[in-house]
Image: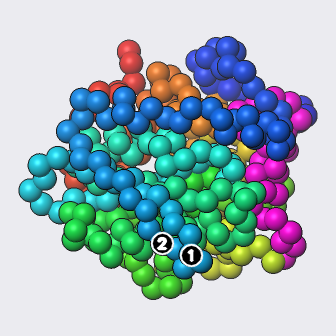
């Protein structure tokens, strides 16, 4: 355990005291976690004027992956699109995990939300996960007209492992020349399989929301037998040689989490390559703080800042938020 590290935000610290925490993941624990109920999507949609469509699409290797599409009802014009990639350490979760985040953007900006159910590690390894995400994005762009999407306003977004996969998908789209991506939003993204930064060392060796040991389990699961020097940048975007030519990028993280330093480094490398990246590191935030405790002041501030950035990149009016920081 590191002897020196940033303190938690006092409000988050009090809230976290009642949460059961783990130190590491094992295959047995993962099997138990996968049995937990999924996000209650019907409850989230209740009261929203939303059209929902469920379908599966083929992948080049013969698999089929599910997509969920949520569209504002009674639209009169083409809408922006948020292509959503869920988190879960690359080993758990589904297309409804953290879906409340992009559904808020549907409410605020009239965005169509497309969420992909990529295959999980360790059953799928290497580039399979990011290829699934890419082909879901490609299908979305190719069917933009049918879906009522403005193809010039597609944002790729995700949290945690989903943020890392969003970064890998964006690199893949850049290198393959299609589809066009207007922006990428990487929310405390999992970017670097090398797991050797100061922040990873600070948050290992004791229970937490996402510890260094849990991170190592996730990466080992997705990498399979790949040697370190053979890890593709689409899987571990931090090892990409070239970060030029990327769309507008938003990255955030907490000071009190494993991914802090790799996220700062990724933004810095985008700047060095001449790109635009907006970076927010929230003081005292642990991994996933805003999703676990949206009532905290720092969580409301993080959500509001993401909304404001999206309004700018989508050329939409800044929203009047009900989730403003409380008095």
Q: Position of residue 29 (x, y in %)?
A: 79, 36
Q: How many marks?
A: 2
Q: For the C terminus, which image quadrant?
A: top left
Q: CA distance from mark 1 to mark 2?
A: 6 Å
Question: Is 322 contained in the magenta span?
Answer: no
Would you say the residues marked 1 and 2 are in contact, meaning their CB atoms lie under 8 Å apart?
yes
Question: Is 217 contained in the magenta span?
Answer: yes
Name the residue nearer the viewer: 7 or 180.
180
Please name the residue that numbered disc 2 is placed on. 58
Please name the residue that numbered disc 1 is placed on. 62
Helix, strand or loop under label 2: strand
Q: Position of residue 45 (x, y in %)?
A: 31, 35
**Vertical side of 129 occupied by 208: above or below:** above
Name the residue nearer the viewer: 227 or 323.
227
Splitting the image into 4 quarters, where does residue 300 fall? top left
Q: Position of residue 251 (x, y in %)?
A: 53, 53
Side of 298 where 83 appears, left or right: left
Write the residue at 12% across / 60% down: 77
**Vertical side of 77 occupied by 229: above or below:** below
Circle 1: is it few (<14), some (14-19), or many (20+) Cα within 10 Å?
few
Name the residue nearer the viewer: 7 or 12.
12
Write the residue at 20% across / 39% down: 49
Q: Position of residue 56 (x, y in %)?
A: 43, 62
Splitting the image into 4 quarters, where does residue 289 fall? top right
Q: For the N terminus, which image quadrant?
A: top right
Range covered by the magenta-colored residues? 200-229
Asked if one can make out residue 68 in the rendered structure from this viewpoint, the answer is yes
Side of 255 where 38 appears, left or right: left
Helix, strand or loop under label 1: loop
Write the residue at 51% across / 66% down: 64
Write the residue at 9% across / 56% down: 76
């Amino acid at each position: 355990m590191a002897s020196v590290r940033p303190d938690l935000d006092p409000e988050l610290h009090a809230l976290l005291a009642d949460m059961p925490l783990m130190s590491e993941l094992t295959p047995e624990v993962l099997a138990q976690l996968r049995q937990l109920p999924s996000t209650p999507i019907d409850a989230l949609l209740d009261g929203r004027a939303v059209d929902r469509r469920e379908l599966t699409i083929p992948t080049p290797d013969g698999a089929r992956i599910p997509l969920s599409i949520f569209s504002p009802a009674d639209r009169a014009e083409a809408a922006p699109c948020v292509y959503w990639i869920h988190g879960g350490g690359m080993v758990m979760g589904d297309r409804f995990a953290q879906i409340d985040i992009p559904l808020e953007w549907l409410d605020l900006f009239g965005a169509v939300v497309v969420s992909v159910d990529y295959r999980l590690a360790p059953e799928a390894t290497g580039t399979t996960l990011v290829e699934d995400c890419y082909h879901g994005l490609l299908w979305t762009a190719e069917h933009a007209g049918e879906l009522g999407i403005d193809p010039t306003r597609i944002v790729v977004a995700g949290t945690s492992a989903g943020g890392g996969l969003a970064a890998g998908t964006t690199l893949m789209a850049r290198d393959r020349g299609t589809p066009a991506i207007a922006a990428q939003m990487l929310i405390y993204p999992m970017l670097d399989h090398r797991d050797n930064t100061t922040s990873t060392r600070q948050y290992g060796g004791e229970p937490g929301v996402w510890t260094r040991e849990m991170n190592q389990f996730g990466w080992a699961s997705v990498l399979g037998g790949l040697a370190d020097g053979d890890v593709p940048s689409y899987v571990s975007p931090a090892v990409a040689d070239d970060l030029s030519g990327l769309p507008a990028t938003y990255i955030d993280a907490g000071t009190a989490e494993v991914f802090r330093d790799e996220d700062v480094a990724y933004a810095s490398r985008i700047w060095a390559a001449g790109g635009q990246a907006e970076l927010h590191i929230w003081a005292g935030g642990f991994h996933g703080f805003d999703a676990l405790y949206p009532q905290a002041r720092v969580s409301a501030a993080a959500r509001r800042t993401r909304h404001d950035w999206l309004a700018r990149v989508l050329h939409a009016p800044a929203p009047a938020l009900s989730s403003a920081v409380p008095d």
